[in-house]
Amino acid sequence: MEQKILEELEFIDESRIFTSKAELYAYGFDASIHHATPDIVIRPKDSEEVERVVTIANEHGLPIVARGAGTALCGQAVPIHGGIILDMTGMNKIKEVRIEDLYCVVEPGVIYAQLNEELGKYGFFFPPTPGSGDVCTIGGMIAVNASGARAIKYGATRDYVLGLEVVFPYGRVRFGGKTLKNSAGYQVERLIVGSEGTLGIITEATLRIFPLPERKAVALASFDNVIKAGEGVADIISAGLLPSALEIMDNVCIQAVNKSMAIGLPDAEAILLIEVDGKECTVREEIEKIAEILGKKATKIEFTDDEEEMLKLWKGRKGVLPSLSRYGEDMISVSLADDMCLPVSKIPHAIKEFQEIAKKYGIVIGAYGHAGDGNLHTKVLINPRKEENWKKAEEAVKEIYKVVHELGGIASGEHGIGITKAPWINGDIETMERIKKAIDPKNIMNPGKMEQWRKSIIAYLRY
Amino acid sequence: MEQKILEELEFIDESRIFTSKAELYAYGFDASIHHATPDIVIRPKDSEEVERVVTIANEHGLPIVARGAGTALCGQAVPIHGGIILDMTGMNKIKEVRIEDLYCVVEPGVIYAQLNEELGKYGFFFPPTPGSGDVCTIGGMIAVNASGARAIKYGATRDYVLGLEVVFPYGRVRFGGKTLKNSAGYQVERLIVGSEGTLGIITEATLRIFPLPERKAVALASFDNVIKAGEGVADIISAGLLPSALEIMDNVCIQAVNKSMAIGLPDAEAILLIEVDGKECTVREEIEKIAEILGKKATKIEFTDDEEEMLKLWKGRKGVLPSLSRYGEDMISVSLADDMCLPVSKIPHAIKEFQEIAKKYGIVIGAYGHAGDGNLHTKVLINPRKEENWKKAEEAVKEIYKVVHELGGIASGEHGIGITKAPWINGDIETMERIKKAIDPKNIMNPGKMEQWRKSIIAYLRY
């Protein structure tokens, strides 16, 4: 980093600037397989500092990458062209909680779990439920449009962003506000959701909040055939029921969980875990109706509204990801396929096809996730020490995404594109490039990512 | 219109091209006070025709304005620079209804009421509820991010757009898709919502759908003080209740309704109309709890879950707009202030201030609307034959919006900006202009509107 630029950055307290080799190396990772070393890491304390840093970066054409908790799975926070990492975790104030106005105002570094702990005091919550919720930041959730298991009923982060303060290369702006509705001009706040730091730096977010449900109930159903499980999902939805979670695990995931956690899940072809929430009288009524509906196709069903029993039923589902790497000797789960999203009814067909692909390449593929909103987590299990396995995995992943797109699916339901999924991004890249160039003409905002998206082999062609 | 261009447009069947003076004049109106005459009206039959027309318009730098049912209240569909009106009502097919996948695919000319009639056959619905729902089109709803009374519980149109096919000047593109989640690139589909035809022409929309509630219940509460009514709203929300509608009427609206409809509404300072929906056991429980909560502040409360009684209670609220023009001799309601949106708890204070403004100018101002989501409809009543009254009205409206913005509100909650509300638009205009220029460099898409937005006297200033 040039001395001149370092001098311009001297308004930042040195305790919040990191330049040692070790620190820069550590900040080069997120939760993906990628790594790149930044030239400097700055932990801003407020919007003004972010604005000043962005202005300097823009003057010098210096790359700038915002980073929350670094839980991104696809390299979103990896500074592939170096430059500045803005560590946003220092901006972690909950500025306002307005229950009667149904919103809260937060800085981007606020941890998801901390926000919901605060809102919980009033009997309210911010519904999206990322798996990394105990550590991930609201800014990161907005950057990738995070969601999780509750999306079938509650939607994703994009549905909760009422207003944003964003620092663009040309200045700090606000869109939306503290109102539940907004038809006053372009919904730029919604465009920023999912833009993965390629347009601007989020410095404040106003989020819609919801009352916490009074009660929950959970059912676990086993199937000897994944197609039957899929039919069960369709039957529940067609009956007008909207569970707060509708999760699926295939046999590979079930076996992995049983090996590593020994909680004795039924050795089925597929398991559905269904959670309903609401008022006491409705959750009981709904879970019983769901059990009755699934009874026609499931080999085994159990359901409960007892707190402890519910936790037990959830335990297996929550243990899938860590368990997968214990599935077999010397095998680890690699996040290459990750989190494709399909029309809900296509989930079982996709899982079937993935199993065929696994057979073809003599590898193991486990699929699990949010059957109710079509968002599948598909993990390839290989022995990473054997170079040939990586080749096999890469070939398998190509076929996996071919299936996803043939079934009307898209590359990512909740994790984002980053670097890993660039070849599979959907949507018209030219339009994204036009918007990117209009807002960030010098391409300083998380540069190098959209260049990879441009190489997408899936992106919709013009008609 | 040049002969050359007319010849290029010959691929459109002449039965769907309108060029007579009378036709062009008629197409120059929407539901606002504005008018401008187009050079030609084309009613395309499919996306391909729209794409060909837009390509021709772009080559010749010809303005092009999409039009649905023409119910826009602020001039959105008025072609202020002439050119082509695309009458989208010919593209009115419901292409797909996928209940188990929780989406439907429609052409932009589909009427809102027709879509919900079709979805209703399966026990599902598209929740936004515009007042013009019997005639307005889905394309128009997306263009202005329409919503209505149900937004406190169900959100607005922007929350339901899963995918769009849009024709930009440079071609036809798709964003989003048939999945409930999407983190695969820029959410351009959400940027298009509310862009009022200034970016592109919507040719297809994929919309999220929801199961219809089983039952409803309605309460009507009268207050001798509008502040108390506002406190009642806050008490309901803070108790964790989320009504499907929470409407307010001030005394002017109550008097207007009683004069024109003679349904004997209580002559109160304010009336709240609350609707809850859901399962039978919850609606009864909730409406009773709401009645109990409001009992502390209301002078009179009635509630029912009887279909006919509910319709009676709704009748007054639904009659406000037409009734206002019968409030006084030679008085009409002019849509100058329209549909500001405020933080929910600011509604009663806004109404109080509006009454002061009315006193100051010796005019009548009636306020009513969606208290639960902060979206107020404010109508100025004047004798339009007296020039001085228009001056008074314009001065009053300036003060009304000053109050709105001082209270943290915005120019429009659901009707959009168009021409009428251009002076009051929020958000950073430079960013909107950058995006507009990037996508529509020749400024053919509904030109002249953003130029007026630029003159906004409210838009957030840079810091």
Image: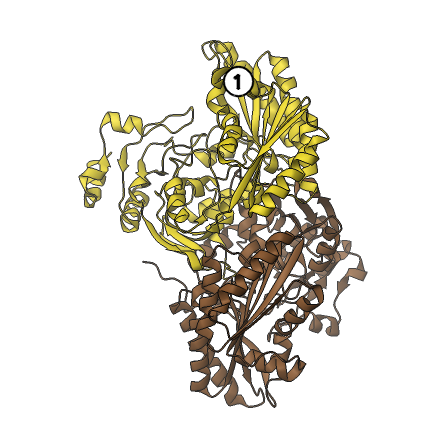
Chain colours: A brown, B yellow
Q: Is residue A40 above or below residue A127?
A: below
| Front one among A386 and A115 | A115
Position in image of residue A47 (x %, y %): 70, 49
Residue at 75% across / 54% down in the picture?
A45
Position in image of residue B90 (x %, y %): 28, 42
| Front one among B82 and B262 | B262
Dot 1 surroundings within 10 Å: few (below 14), some, or many (20 or more)?
A: many
Q: Which residue is mark 1?
A: B258
Position in image of residue B13 (x %, y %): 19, 42
Q: Is residue A280 visible?
A: yes
| Front one among B197 and A329 | A329
Q: Is residue B33 above or below residue A229?
A: above
Identify the image quadrant of the C terminus of chain A. bottom left
Identify the image quadrant of the N terminus of chain A. bottom right
Q: Is residue B258 above or below residue A244?
A: above
Q: Determine whether, in the image, residue B29 is placed left or right of residue B337.
A: left
Image quadrant assignment for residue A300: bottom right
Residue at 36% across / 51% down in the picture?
B170
Kind of residue at badge 1: Asn
Residue at 70% across / 32% down in the picture?
B231
- Write down the chain letter for disc 1: B
- Label 1, secondary structure: give it: helix
